[in-house]
Image: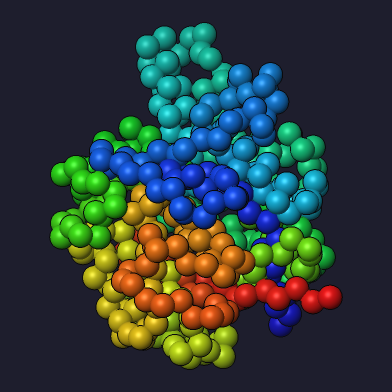
Amino acid sequence: MEEKATYFINGVGIITPQKTFDREVFLSEISQYDKNILTCIAPDFKAYINPIQMRRLSRMLRIGLSAATICLRNSKITMPDGIITATGYGFLDETAKFLKELLEQGEKQLTPTYFMQGTSNALAGLVALTIKCMGYNNTYASKGVGFENALTDTMMQLNENASLNFLIGAYDEAAEIQYNASIRASHFKTEFINNLSLFDTNTKGSIQGEGSAFFMLSGKSSASTLCIMSDMDVVYKPDGRELQDALDNFLATNSLDAEHIDVIINGVSGDVEHDAVTNTLIRSRFENTAQTRFKHLCGEYTTATSFALWLGTSILSRQQVPDIVKVQHWNQPDKLRTILIVNQYMSKSFTFILLKEFVQTQ
């Protein structure tokens, strides 16, 4: 049996509808939205991208490349051994532009840029070309489990060779074409709400979000290590009993009980139907555990687990829990050692990620 490595998160870079690209602040300045669509707060791209190169890039490619660059700088690793990305829907804006031009011009004299920047692996290729990385390069485009598949791939690679460093990223955009289609499928709310009031609603649907997050994962620690990702598991389309058993098995596999978890990061989305499943699960196992939520800050999207992973990593490395993510007021313990992420996407896929504090030794 393949020996399991220890997975160290040695760097992070993230751009979301909150000012998360600035590592000097941690959810102290909160942005509010009233139209059910949350879009990324972008940094000064010139600080991360060559201005000549930037002219040819779409908005989401700029965001993704900047997030990757922030992560590389944070980890102090200039050349990873591989790049693995994940997305649910890819670059829909560029795809829509290409298809529109295809129809309007009768398949003649098409602009190749829209096609090239509309493919799901465009960001992984762009990052590799920018830093001249010739190593392993893969993209997972698998809806609500895309980021989880990318994590699984990374974990398998590190189990074989713990000395490697992998740049793993996720991205999805709040495209108008996706929003219109998702409204018809009742994925998003029909009534406009303020994002900070998301969990005060009692209706079906969530609010659309977007973001790009990159992490440097390795089987060895470094001076920049933020925390340890101990384990991850995904459950697809379970019934209530199967979901509870999966969580119990996940905890047992990692020799944990409910009292060992300091903080739960709950991936509820403000959808009265989907949230009922997750809330019931957490209440049945972690009634007395401190809870946090995050989708009122970033919205719902297929790779929102990456936001939760950034949040958990930041909480453990900073030993600080922002009030904006707390479910109710609770006093923070003196030491935060273990965080459990329980995320769900449309009640189809459920993700468990276990994070542990990393203590630097001299």
The answer to which of 143 and 301 lies nearer the viewer is 301
**Residue at x 35% of width, y 86% of height:** 288
Q: Residue at x 57, y 45 (%)?
A: 22
Q: Does residue 233 appear anywhere in the picture?
A: no
Residue 110 or 326: which is nearer the viewer? 326
Q: Residue at x 65, y 71 (%)?
A: 228
- Quadrant of res 102: top left
Left or right of residue 289: residue 25: right
Q: Is residue 45 left or right of residue 324?
A: right
Quadrant containing the C terminus is: bottom right
- Residue at image location 34% in from the left, 79% down from the top: 282
Find residue 287 and report its image quarter. bottom left
- Which image quarter is the N terminus in? bottom right
Q: Taking 107 as reference, is 187 left or right?
A: left
**For residue 313, side relative to residue 134 (left or right):** left
Q: Is residue 70 visible?
A: yes
Q: Position of residue 184 (x, y in %)?
A: 20, 42
Residue 55 on image: x %, y % = 61, 19
Q: How is the image coloured?
A: rainbow
- When the figure is inspected, residue 56 is found, relative to residue 184, above or below; the finding is above
**Number of callouts:** 0
Location of residue 264 in the rendering, given as x and y in whole percent from the top left corner: 43, 74
Q: Position of residue 227 (x, y in %)?
A: 64, 69
Q: Is residue 342 above or below residue 70?
A: below
